[in-house]
Image (tube, rainbow, N blue to C red):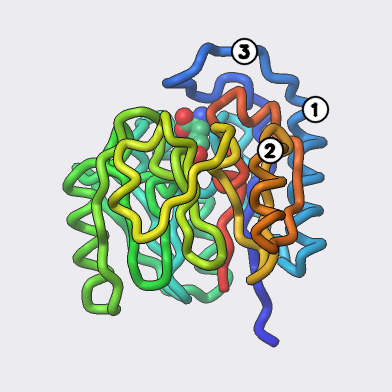
Amino acid sequence: MRKKYVLVRRPAKSLQDGLVTHIERETVDVELAERQWESYVAALTGAGWDPVEVAPAGDLPDSVFVEDTVVMFGALAVLTSPGADERLDEIDGVEESLTALGLEVLRIERPGTLDGGDVLKIGTTIFVGRGGRTNSDGIRQLRKILAPRGYSVVAVPVTKALHLKSTVTALPDGTVIGYRPLVDDPFVYDRFLEVPEPSGAHVVILADDTVLIASSAPESARLIEGLGYRVISVDISEFEKLEGCVTCLSVRIR
Ligand SMILES: NC(=O)NCCC[C@H](N)C(=O)O
């Protein structure tokens, strides 16, 4: 069986200086964050994923949110063009890890901006959030890269949260789940299921029958379990204080 790699990046010592846009700033316990990160990586490993650690970047507070720096399409890695200038320097370290894995690497360039947190892949349909971090030129560039490879890019406005995937993600069967007050328009998706908690909208698909969710969303976890999935919960409270969620801490490479 082919190895399933997952890219992760250890939290920076300066984590507490990470950006906050839509929520009030709270003090981050960096030591607790480190322990939570270890448990998060252990959950991925336990589900059969092989972690590849991008070299840590002590002076880049948001570097742990590695999802925003690259989007994978099979063996193609598209490095992003982060919408926040403070995050631009995160790209180089990620590129080194991707090249070392022998992947084809392309990139979105300024003036285009695109954050990985704005990209939701469901089969060959790629939903891209147009919001605070991703602009129309970034979407245009991604569309140009993906069209010849058989993907269609569907752009959707995001006005109520940081990223598209702060508002919705998808279950293994393709059902889009979201916390309704944060979703601009649920009708852009073929199937939409409302979850009862904001962080319940975020799942990482670990296998066809298994998803990872934050422990801050117990009711949503029960709802998803009721649909026949195995649900693994992890506490990521310190990352949630910086508008992070379970998806943003890793990038799966299949
Ligand atoms: N994909 C994600 O949900 N990323 C979270 C990024 C949080 C970080 N503090 C930021 O504002 O960029």
**Which residue is depicted at the point 57% across and 73% down?**
254
Dot label at residue 57: none
Q: Where is residue 105? Give x, y as percent.
A: 40, 67
**Which residue is depicted at the point 40% across and 30% down?**
161
Q: Where is residue 68? Give x, y as percent.
A: 46, 46
Three-letter code, disc 1:
Leu
Frontmost of labels 1 and 2 is 2
Mark 2 Cα within 10 Å, few/some/many (few <14, many 20+)? some
Locate residue 211: give its quadrant: bottom right
Measure how far apart labels 3 and 1 are at the Cα level. Answer: 14 Å
Q: Where is residue 90? Give x, y as percent.
A: 48, 42
Tell me if I can see residue 90 in this picture. Answer: no
Confirm or reject: label 3 Cβ below 8 Å from ligand 1: no
Frontmost of labels 2 and 3 is 2
Measure how far apart labels 2 and 3 are at the Cα level. Answer: 24 Å
Q: Judge by depth and name the residue closer to the eye, 192 or 163.
A: 192
Residue picked out by circle 3 = 26
Three-letter code, disc 3:
Glu
Above or below for 127 versus 222:
below
Residue picked out by circle 2 = 219
Q: Judge by depth and name the residue closer to the eye, 235 or 194.
A: 194
Confirm or reject: label 1 Cβ below 8 Å from ligand 1: no
Q: Judge by depth and name the residue closer to the eye, 54 or 72.
A: 72
Q: Earlier in the sequence, mark 2 or mark 3?
A: 3
Q: Where is residue 139? Give x, y as percent.
A: 23, 52
Dot label at residue 32: 1
**Which residue is depicted at the point 64% across and 42% down?**
220
